[in-house]
Image: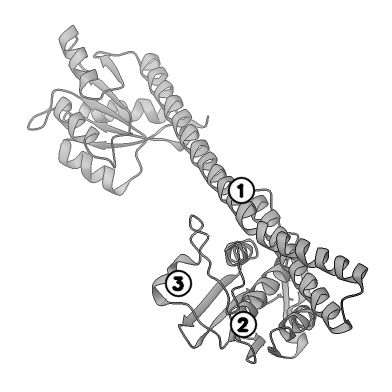
Amino acid sequence: MDFSLYKILTVDDIPANVWLLKSMLEQSGLQVCSAGNSEEAFTRLKTETIDLILLDVLMPDVNGFELAEQLKNDPDYREIPIIFLTALNEPGDIVKGFQQGGNDFISKPFNKEELIARIRHQLTLLEAKRTIQRQTSELQRTIAGRDALYSVIAHDLRLPMSSLKMTLNVLLLKMEEYQIGEQDIMEMLQTANETTEQLFTLLDNLLKWTRSQVGKLEGVPQSINLAELTEGVVEIFSMVAATKKIKINFQSSPVEETEVWVDIDMIKTAIRNLISNAIKFSYSGSEIDVVVESKETEVIFSVTDHGCGIKEENQHKLLDTAIHYTTFGTEHESGSGLGLLLVNEFMKLNNGRLFFESKEGEGSIFGFALAKKTA
């Protein structure tokens, strides 16, 4: 441990004692600040990050035991370890010190080496406790992500898989019985193709979301042209949109102005998810506008639909990882709620930002901004 990273607060009403403690602790590489009474102590605590308190017991007005009780009753300070420094050495005084929340008790006059050793011991315990709290928090997030993932797999994979299985089974049976026409075959194959595309997107999102939640998703940035990348995705999704009689319009600034430095796979997935959502929530016969626009320092990607929109009271739920909020599309298409969460995560990993606005019954705009590639 680097003990110089920790700050000690000494609380004593006798200046000579304060000076002595400060000198001894600073010589040992510790950061030190001081207070002469309880009021000054709280002022220090509010303005500085304190890791341990050396507290004298015999002080006027509020004594050390009373101050310790106040600190332990305050949620902002109760975790700070306290070492009492006092001439009181009766067993009753020592017991009272521990009852008031003290972590250690050193009688005056004290030995410098013993004081430093006890301080370092308490700081070591404090750091161990903080490490456990961090690891517990990370574990809880991982478990929550895992449980959400299992829920999505159990619920959202069942419907497209059963649909695909049923379509292919009917197709095979009808072909064997020669009771199917070319138009019926095309419709069934189209349904199977759409379902397969949904499955691919869902599985891809699930895999990437899981990796991001366990901290194993790392970007590999490279120079890409956002306009060209978007145009390729639009070309593919235009065929998907056509099944709902939806037209996708694409326009962009000159391609040489849309260079960005990002992970191409993450950004391609983000584009795919936003366009897929726009198709899902658009009505048959409507249009979707996909725009890549060059600004002074950013390149802006946006998808505008004229579909069902999102209720204002539900918009704050879209990026809540604990909810995985989702609704059915205009033709009852289902979803996992992971797509937008994944886009938001990818923007953070690529120093970008996600934005959206929506109005129920009128449509939505979803997009992201990425920093322009510098020369």
Residue 40 in the image, given as x and y percentages of width and height: 19, 41
The residue labelled by disc 1 is: 150
The crowd level at tag 3 (other Cα within 10 Å; few <14, some 14-19, many 20+) is some
Residue 315: assigned label? 3
Can see residue 359? yes
Answer left or right for 201 relative to 57: right
- Most extreme residue toward the left, as rendered? 61
Residue, x 83% and y 74% (percent of image)?
189
Is residue 314 shown above or below 116? Answer: below
Quadrant of the image occupied by residue 350? bottom right
Is residue 373 shown above or below 283? Answer: above
Residue 19 in the image, given as x and y percentages of width and height: 27, 30
The crowd level at tag 1 (other Cα within 10 Å; few <14, some 14-19, many 20+) is few
Answer left or right for 90 relative to 346: left
Whether tag 2 and tag 3 are in contact, CB under 8 A, the answer is no
Residue, x 47% and y 86% (percent of image)?
361
- Most extreme residue toward the top, as rendered? 91
Answer left or right for 14 relative to 328: left
Residue, x 53% and y 46% (percent of image)?
144
The residue labelled by disc 2 is: 302
Q: State how far apart marks 1 and 3 are (Cα).
A: 25 Å
Is residue 142 shown above or below 271? Answer: above
Can see residue 87? no
Numbered disc 1: secondary structure: helix
